[in-house]
Amino acid sequence: MALLVLKFGGTSVADLDRIRAAAKHIKREIDAGNQCAVVVSAMGDQTDHLVSWTREAAALHDAREYDVVVSTGEQVTCGLLSIILQNMGVPARSWLGWQLPIHTDGAHGAARILDIETDQLKSRLKNGEVAVVPGFQGRSPDGRITTLGRGGSDTSAVALAAALGADRCDIYTDVDGIYTGDPRIVPHARRLDKISYEEMLETASLGAKVLQTRSVQLAMVHQVRLLVRSSFESADGKQDDGGHTGTLVCDEDEIVEQQVVSGIAYTKDEAKVTLIGVEDKPGVAARVFGPLADASINVDMIVQNVSGDGETTDLTFTVSAADLDRALDVLQKVKAELAYEDLRGSTEIVKVSVIGIGMRSHAGVASQMFKALADKGINIEAISTSEIKISVLIDAAYAELAVRTLHSLYGLDNA
Amino acid sequence: MALLVLKFGGTSVADLDRIRAAAKHIKREIDAGNQCAVVVSAMGDQTDHLVSWTREAAALHDAREYDVVVSTGEQVTCGLLSIILQNMGVPARSWLGWQLPIHTDGAHGAARILDIETDQLKSRLKNGEVAVVPGFQGRSPDGRITTLGRGGSDTSAVALAAALGADRCDIYTDVDGIYTGDPRIVPHARRLDKISYEEMLETASLGAKVLQTRSVQLAMVHQVRLLVRSSFESADGKQDDGGHTGTLVCDEDEIVEQQVVSGIAYTKDEAKVTLIGVEDKPGVAARVFGPLADASINVDMIVQNVSGDGETTDLTFTVSAADLDRALDVLQKVKAELAYEDLRGSTEIVKVSVIGIGMRSHAGVASQMFKALADKGINIEAISTSEIKISVLIDAAYAELAVRTLHSLYGLDNA
C-alpha cells in the first residue's frame, strides 16, 4: 500500500473519453489498495483558448485577471474527473487551489508554490477518497488565484507529492518513458528503467519536453520519486503486473547498474550568431554580450577564433532560435561601437549532447565522441561541457547521423 | 452620485465585442460619478456547453462537482471584463463568489444566497474601483462553490444591490424594457416607464422571460429598484440624456400616474387536461390531484362542468406543457380508481392575462374583458384571478386576436 500522486497532462485529459481512461488508471491504483491524490491539467487546447481570449481583451493585461480566466481550464477538468470517478464507484472530490489551499507567492502568471496544506487531504486519502487537484494554480498571500506559468502542472504534482510525503509521483503522459535517444531518429533506442534527477535535468533543459525542468529540480530537492509513464496504455494492461512500465526518475543511489552514458539528446531550438572581423582586444566580449544580456537574451555556447592577421577575430555563439532576430537587431544597433566586419545568423545548426552520470568517474568519453564524429566527417563548431554532459554544435544536416553514431558508440542500442 | 449594481446577462456578454459594449455602459456610469458593482453571466452558450460536459461525464452526477465545472463560465467573463475595463482606464477587479464571499446554503445546483460580505467592496467602490462579480454562484457553509440554478444571475445582482444598499440595480438585457404587450404581436405596444413589483411578478410568472421571478420577489422584499434596459443601445446614445431609457420596476408608491391595467401578457407554455365522465361526488378532486402532486406536477387553472345527467362531471385543468405527457401517464395509471370515461390532453391553448395594480380599486375590469372577448367570438375555457390579474384560457388560434383586442380595450395602444 502506497501513497501516490498521479498527474495527467493536457493530452491525457483532452476529452471525456481520455478523462475516462485516466479514471481507469486511478481506479486500478485504488483497487490495489493505494491512496491517490490526482493532479490534472486543462483539457487539450483549453488553456490556449482561454489565453487567446485574454490577449484579445487587451494585449497588455492585468496578470491577476489573466489568472482568474486561465485557471478555469484545470477547474473544469477537476470537476469532470471527480464525476467520472464517482460514477465508477470510486469516492472522489475536487480540491481547488484556493480550497486546500496551495499557497503561492504573488507573482501572478508565474507564481511559485510556497506551501500546501494537506491535513484535511491526508485524512480523506486514508479513507480511500481520491483528491482531485488542479495543476498550475494556487492562492496568493492576499487570497487571489495565481497560476504557475505554462506547463506548471508537473510542478504542482511534485510539490503535492513532497507535501504529502508520497511514495511516488506518477506523471502520466503521451510517451511511455525516457529513452536513450529520440525513437523517431534512433530505431534502436531503449527505454530507460531508471534515470537520475541530474541526468533528467540535463535532458529536460535540452528540450526533451517530457518533464518541466522546474518540476525535476523540485523532485530532486525533496527526493520525490517520479515515474514517467503512458496514459495511453490500457489501465489493466499486462505490462503492469508486478513492476511498472515507464521510467523512474530517482536519486542516483537507487540506480544499481550505472552506465557511463545514459542517453543521447539533441535540440534544434538553437541558433548560431557569428561576428566576423571583431577587434581582438580586451573588453570586446563585454561589449558584445552586455547589450544582449540587457535585452534578456541568453547566450549558450561561445567560441572565439583568432584570425590570421592577429588583429581581428571571429566570435561565434548560440542563442535560442526564438531570440535570433532580436539578437541580430541588438548587434546591428551597436555596429559602430563594435566595429565588426560582418554579422551572420543561422538556425541550420543542432546541439547534440551525451549525458551520463557515470562520466564523472570515467575519463575519455569526450575524446571518443570527438573521434567518432570526425570519422563520419562531422565538423564540430562549438563545445560545452558539464560534469555529466558534453554538448557539441554541428550542422543541422548531420543531426540524425551524429545521434545514431553516438548512440551506437556508447553501447545504447537495443540488442 | 449614486451607488449602482449593473447586471449583464449572457447575450450582453456573448463575445469580446459584446463585453466591450458592456464596459462602455459601465464607463459611462463611472464618468458620471457613480459607484459601480457589476454582476455578469457566462458568455453566450458557455453554461450550456459546460452543463453538457457534466451530463456526458455521467447522467447522474454530484451536484458539488457540477458546480465546480459550471461556475467557471461566469469566472471567465469576470476576468475578461476586468481586463477590458482596465484597458479603458477604468480601475476594476474581479471578486469571485468565494472571495467576497457570497454566502449561500448548501443546496448545490439550486443554492440560495444567505448573506454577502461587502465591507471590502464598499471601500473599493468609494475609491472609484469597479467590482466585477460573477452571477449565479456563491460559497457553501463548508467552503465549496455553489451555483444558484439556471438564470440565477438576476438574483445575484438584486442580492448584491440589497447588501450594498444600492440606489438602483440596472438589468442590462437584449430588450429595452417591459412593454404593455408583446411587441411582436401588438404593434402598438408601449414601453412602460415604471411597473410595480407585484405587476412584474405576475408578468414574470406568466413566462415573460425578461426577469427571473425570484429576483423580482427579492427586489420587492428588499425594496431594490430595478431598471430593465438594453445593452444593445449605444452607451453614449442620446436617448440617455437626463433620464433613462428602460423600465423601472419599483414600489407602487413611486408610480404617480397609476393606470388600471398596465399590460396584457400571454403564455403558450400551458397544456389542458380534460377528464370526461368523472363521478360527481365528494373526494374525486383529491383522487385526481393527489397523484399529480405526488409526481411534482403543478396544476394551475381548474374548471368543473356538471354534466346533464347530474351523476358524472367533466374536469378540466391546466399543467405546464412540459409536464403534459407525465400528467396523462399518471392519470392513466389511476384510471380504474377514478373511473372516468375519457382522458384528453391538448397544448393548443393559450393563457391570456390582464395585469394591473389599479384593478384593486377599479371594478368592472373582468366584465369588460369577458364581453370584449365574447364580441370577437372567443370562447373562454377557464378563468383564474388574483388581486391584480385576470387570466383566461382560450384556443391557441385566437391568441393574437385576444391580446390585441384587450390591449386596445384598456387604452394601452400607442397614440
Image: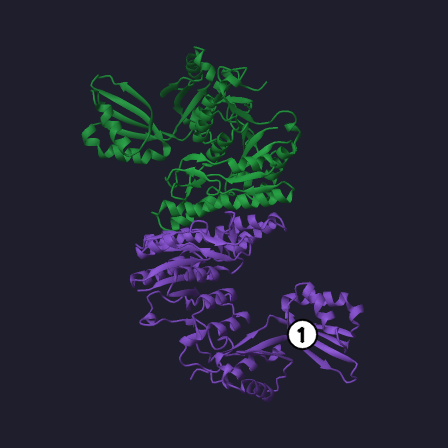
Chain colours: A purple, B green
Q: Nearer the viewer, residue A74 or B167?
A: B167
Q: Considering depth in this image, is A243 or B357 the residue closer to the camera?
A: A243
Using residue A331 as the reference point, say whether residue A59 is left or right of it. Answer: left
User: Could you tell me which residue is drawn at 32 percent across and 36 percent down?
Assistant: B325
Task: Name the residue that disc number 1 marks.
Answer: A317
Q: Nearer the viewer, residue B357 or A23?
A: A23
Q: In the figure, residue A245 lies in which quadrant? A: bottom left
Q: Residues within 10 Å of mark 1 (few under 14, many from 20)?
A: many
Q: Position of residue A209 (x, y in %)?
A: 51, 67
Quadrant of the frame with the C terminus of chain B = top right
Looking at the picture, does residue B67 appear above or below residue A33? Answer: above
Position in image of residue A143 (x %, y %): 50, 47
Report whether residue A231 is seen: no
The part of the image, by quadrant, that contains residue B343 is: top left
For this view, does B197 lie left or right of residue A275? left
Q: Nearer the viewer, residue B215 or A333?
A: A333
Residue B355, horizontal then vertical, whole percent: 45, 20
Q: Is residue A86 visible?
A: yes
Badge 1: chain ID: A
Query: Where is the N terminus of chain B found, in terms of image quarters?
Result: top right
Image location (x, y in percent) of residue B251: 49, 21
Amino acid type for the residue under numbered disc 1 = Phe
